[in-house]
Amino acid sequence: GQSLEQPSEVTAVEGAIVQINCTYQTSGFYGLSWYQQHDGGAPTFLSYNALDGLEETGRFSSFLSRSDSYGYLLLQELQMKDSASYFCAVRFPSSGGSYIPTFGRGTSLIVHP
Amino acid sequence: DTGVSQNPRHKITKRGQNVTFRCDPISEHNRLYWYRQTLGQGPEFLTYFQNEAQLEKSRLLSDRFSAERPKGSFSTLEIQRTEQGDSAMYLCASSIPSGMGTGELFFGEGSRLTVL
């Protein structure tokens, strides 16, 4: 089957570093993405990893290990505005031959002062 | 760039009524997706269009749900004979062909459905 697992909640203090893990099971794979969603808002794209390794975009970095079916999102120098839900997403091959972005259940990040 | 637009933003209806949501994707995006999201959950895939062709439908999508994308531009999602379990946020997203990049989805603000 196809599934993604990520922690339901993570808490941290302002200025700290936090890592949100994501593991996936799939018979095919076409890249791991991360999205951020604030309460009442739309999900917005943060990063994408197609190959193993670390991708850095400002305070956010994303890592992928395809052999371990594992990735993580690293948020540095946390700010209060980073409090949001974070979703990992993988494009799984569907029965119709398309690669459909499938989302995890999300990790609620709470940043404390 | 006006982004992905969805309307109505909120819809309250009585059980058994039909509702229709509209999505206007980013104009140059040929791929369009509908997702459903409930509180504390991630977006759940419903259906996918490439241009005007509906290429994928989730097995979770009952016969009461139908989607169209005439002429490959805007899309509509109709729910017939609504049930209380249909209450959710219905999200539309569009993207360019994945072979050209990250497959980034651009989401609209969503249409929140409440079935009484």
Image (spheres, grey):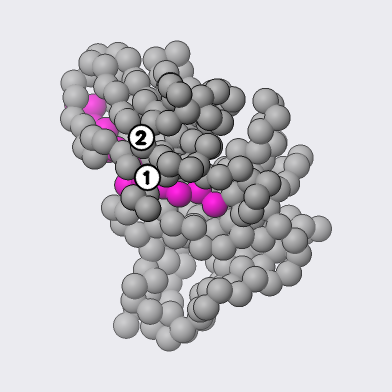
Q: Chain of mark 2?
A: B
Give the crowd class for mark 1: few <14, some 14-19, many >=20 residues within 10 Å: many
Please, what secondary structure does the residue beneath circle 1 have? loop
Residue at 63% x, 46% y is B98
- Above or below residue A18? Residue B109 is above
Residue at 37% x, 74% y is A111
Magenta-drawn segment: B104-116
The residue lying toward the viewer, choosing from B33 and B84, is: B33
Task: Name the image quarter holding residue A22.
Answer: bottom right
Q: Which quarter of the figure is the N terminus of chain A placed in? A: top right
Residue type at mark 2: give it: Cys
> In the image, B40: left or right of B51?
left
Q: CA–CA distance between discs 1 and 2?
A: 7 Å
Whether pointer 1 and pointer 2 mark residues with C-beta atoms closer than 8 Å, the reply is yes
| Numbered tag placed on residue B4 in the rendering | 1
Residue at the spot of label 2: B23
Q: Is residue A69 magenta?
A: no
Give the crowd class for mark 2: few <14, some 14-19, many >=20 residues within 10 Å: many
